[in-house]
Amino acid sequence: MARLSSAFPAAPRECCSLSSRLFETRRLSLDLARPLSAEDMTVQAMDDTSPTKWHLAHTTWFFEIFVLARNLNGYEPFDETFNYCFNSYYESQGPRQPRGKRGLLTRPSSNHVFAYRAHVDAGLEKLLSGDLAPGSELANIIEVGINHEQQHQELMLTDILALFAANPLRPAYLAPRPRADQREPEPLRWVEYSGGIHEIGHGGDGFAWDNEAPRHRQLIRPFRLADRLVTNVEWLAFIEDGGYRTCALWLADGWEIINREGWRAPLYWEERDGQWFVMSLEGMRPIDRSAPAAHVSYYEADAFARWAGYRLPTEFEWEVAVKGSEVTGNTLASGALRPLPAAPHPDVRPRQMFGDVWEWTQSAYLPYPGYRAPAGALGEYNGKFMVGQQVLRGGSCATPEGHARATYRNFFYPHQRWQFMGLRLASEVE
């Protein structure tokens, strides 16, 4: 168990060079791994997760394969076997270790992976020793690599939580910190939005993933959005009212999975002598009644919304609601590493839109009109996953600073819930 004495800031985009942001991001990954033992970094809790050691190596493999091997004259690969070990899903790069068996990679050792990172970082420093033209092909792929590593930093934390939750000792990633006295959440308030045709998607300024474009027009009917996220105490009411036992609330696939898996509460919740606890990165702690409910699947979020008499927002409604808002919230840089209660505010306006938990939407993860996957290996990054998944918006308490934005489209299968996933209610305007 360790205490990280500081938060995890990322270099501000507006004042730092691309190379500075690159190496700041690379250092942050090592900082996140520092509280772990070599054994912690080797195993995985389930097929959806990956070992920390694999995350550290895979993000390094990305820079080796897509940056150094193609741009640095005389670059010598660190280990030819690593392409098999640390490729993720790039068919263009050949066969790979099956995802669910990454925890069997006891070799290479963690120290060997650290040496791999140092080798690749030295190559990157050599490559970037001269001027790098903004907007060049090399600058663009490095930008992709930075954002790719930030995604894996969030996955590192959620996968560590899954691992420690599966450990009977319930170890803590961080030493527990004092928490404010329990309080009830403020009553839910509503923000209304007019209908009309709205521009949706990334407008072309700054970095964005290909799945955020093309920008297009979307017809949206008048709607209203809850001013905060659904809380743990509200989820307790859902449980106590038989929410997990009432089939009429559930989509058929959701009803099948909660009965097959025995779900009766969010992931990591555990009832002891009539009191609910939750496994967190600080170990097992009593639930915070006013904090956002987290680690729920799309099926659970949808059932809760039905029980409450509302629905989930569409991703387009969510984007309209945050248009023009500052992208700020309880993300990784805050150091909390857990969802926090909404800060009181006298005005009725959306709170917690960024950070705390990724917000499930009722929108299927589909291509925007006119979308075309990029050419080459990076065309595999998003486009081939556009079926059978749901869009989440906003970011979480584990999302690196500067990584979230209004148009960001995260996506997961509806049964998955090991990420910091929660919900916000919506409805039509009557």
Image (spheres, rainbow, N blue to C red):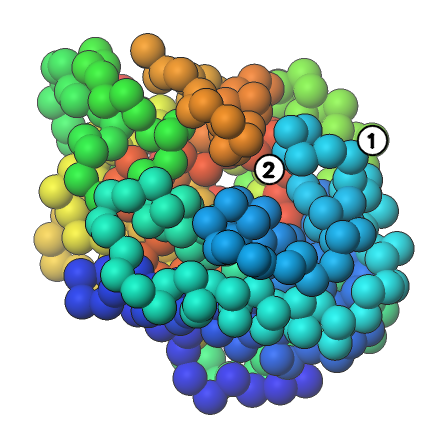
Using the image as rendered, state which of residue 302 and residue 49 is in the foreground.
49
Q: Identify the disc placed on residue 6.
A: none
- Mark 1 is surrounded, within 10 Å at the Cα level, by few (under 14), some (14 to 19) or many (20 or more) other residues, namely few
- Amino acid on which the number 1 mark rests in the picture: Arg
Instruction: In the rendered view, tell whether residue 244 sits above or below residue 45.
Output: above
| Residue 348 shows in this picture | yes
Q: Residue 211 location, x and y as percent? A: 39, 28
Q: Is 142 displayed left or right of 32 in the figure? A: left
- Mark 2 is surrounded, within 10 Å at the Cα level, by few (under 14), some (14 to 19) or many (20 or more) other residues, namely many
Q: Is 85 displayed left or right of 129 in the figure? A: right
Q: Residue at x 42, y 62 (%)?
A: 127
Q: In what element is the residue under mark 1?
A: helix
Q: Are marks 2 and 1 in contact (CB under 8 Å)?
A: no
Using the image as rendered, state which of residue 94 and residue 394 is in the foreground.
94
Q: Residue 152 location, x and y as percent? A: 55, 54
Q: Residue 83 location, x and y as percent? A: 72, 47
Q: Which residue is mark 1?
A: 260
| Residue 63 shows in this picture | no
Q: Residue at x 26, y 61 (%)?
A: 131
Cα distance, mark 2 to mark 1?
A: 15 Å
**Looking at the image, is mark 2 or mark 1 earlier in the sequence?**
1
Q: Is 164 displayed left or right of 218 in the figure? A: right
Query: Where, quadrant-wise, is the N terminus in this rendering?
Result: bottom right
Q: Residue 14 location, x and y as percent? A: 18, 61
Q: In what element is the residue under mark 2?
A: loop
Using the image as rendered, state which of residue 293 and residue 185 is in the foreground.
293
Instruction: In the rendered view, tell whether residue 105 sits above or below residue 332.
Output: above
- Dividing the picture into quadrants, the one containing residue 359 is top left
Query: Where, quadrant-wise, is the C terminus in this rendering?
Result: top left
- Amino acid on which the number 2 mark rests in the picture: Ser
Q: Which residue is mark 2?
A: 297
Q: Residue at x 58, y 54 (%)?
A: 64
